[in-house]
Image (cartoon, rainbow, N blue to C red):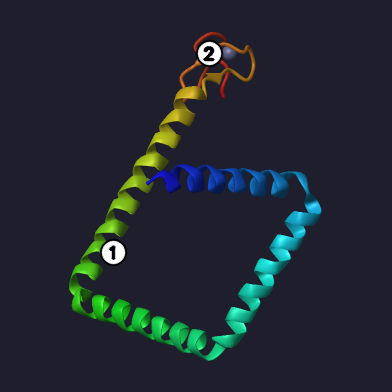
Amino acid sequence: MEILFIIVPIFIGCMFIFTFGMILSPTLRSKFMGHQLKMQKRMLEDNKDVIQDLGKLTGEIGVKTTKGIMDENEDDLRHISSKGADIASDGITKTVRAIKKGMSDAGDVYCKHCGESIDSDSTFCKACGKKQ
Ligand SMILES: [Zn+2]
């Protein structure tokens, strides 16, 4: 039990020294990173075939699973996508209506001749009587 009181602080101390060394010394850092990269590269090269097979297998399973899910739920998916289109078209219609309304609300109409504010649908100015 007492040994832990020696080992743990030494371990933590080493971690500190290592971390500070990594932060402070670019040489140490690049050396360590280079070593790690080399290790990873070697590992990848050693297991190239396995990794390729695994990737292929994972891809195949993914495609099969997705296809299976889509086949099993074809009707639901079709329903959801058509509902989605309905919702989208409704939203778009509402937005367009709101924009049109906003534009007509903001677009006050003035007489071309005297500049008096007039109704947007009036043919003659109510102030000067001239045709718009
Ligand atoms: Zn006028």
Residue furthest right as drawn: 27
Viewer-proximal residue, 101 or 22? Answer: 22
Earlier sequence position, callout 1 versus callout 2:
1
Residue positioned 36% across, 81% down in the render: 63
Image side of residue 125 versus residue 27, left or right: left
Q: Would residue 34 be seen by someone viewing this image from the given angle?
A: yes
Q: Residues within 10 Å of mark 1 (few under 14, many from 20)?
A: few
Image side of residue 124 versus residue 115, left or right: left
Viewer-proximal residue, 78 or 100? Answer: 78
Q: Quadrant of the C terminus?
A: top right
Return the x and y of residue 39 as percentages of the image width and height.
64, 74
- Disc sitting over residue 81 in the figure: 1
Return the x and y of residue 72 as percentages of the image width and height.
19, 78
Return the x and y of residue 48 as percentages of the image width and height.
56, 87
Residue positioned 38% across, 47% down in the render: 92
Specify the amino acid type for callout 1.
Ser
| Marks 1 and 2 in Cβ contact (< 8 Å) | no
Does the residue tagged 1 have its C-beta within 8 Å of any atom of ligand 1?
Answer: no
Q: Would residue 121 be seen by someone viewing this image from the given angle?
A: no
In the rendered image, the vertical position of residue 30 relative to residue 37, given as above or below: above
Residue under label 2: 117
Q: Residues within 10 Å of mark 2 (few under 14, many from 20)?
A: some
